[in-house]
Amino acid sequence: MKNLQVRVEDEEIEDLDELAEELRLSRSELARSALREGVRRMRMEKALARYLNLEFTLSRAARYAGVPIREMADLAAAKGIPSFRISLDDLRRDREKARTWVKG
């Protein structure tokens, strides 16, 4: 494991120490956990932005963020973003294909 040195405000240290005590963790354990969670959230937000910009599919966004696709879909839904995209033309084409299948 490598060391990382960061500068934080006194208030942040107090918050970290208070929460660490409540959770019965060391300051270092809590800081590592908070860093992991923060990086995870930032990657999810970045992946969702790339999904919105049509750079990623939802599946690719989930892989980029390192989370299950269901979790990425839930985040998208929570932000009012549809978890699938299909054009009106695609819907019409699929409807016509389905009609030919039904007619047999």
Image (spheres, helix red, strand yellow):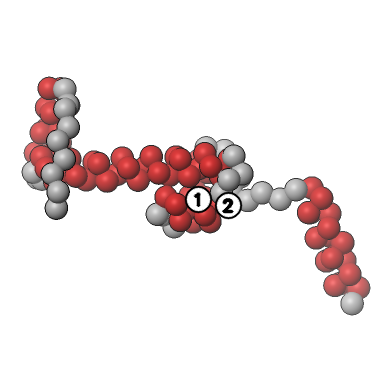
Give the number of the disc on residue 57: 2
Vertical position of residue 66 compared to residue 22: above or below: below
Please identify the residue farthest to the bottom as the structure is shown. Answer: 104
Residue nearest the observer in this picture, 22 or 69 = 69
Q: Residue at x 32, y 42 (%)?
A: 39
Local SS, label 1: helix
Identify which residue, 102 or 88, lies in the foreground.
88
The picture places residue 101, in percent across and down from the top left corner, at: 85, 72
Q: Are marks 2 and 1 in contact (CB under 8 Å)?
A: yes
Residue 76's disc is none
Quarter of the rendering occupied by the C terminus: bottom right
Q: Against 84, is 52 above or below?
A: above
Pointer 1 residue: 61
Q: In this view, does 68 lie above or below 56?
A: below
Residue at the image position 11 percent from the left and 27 percent from the top: 14
11 sits left or right of 39 in the view:
left
Q: What element carries label 2?
A: loop
Residue 38 image position (x, y, % from top left): 31, 40
Q: Looking at the picture, which amino acid does disc 2 mark?
A: Thr
Quadrant position of residue 33: top left
Q: Is residue 40 visible?
A: yes
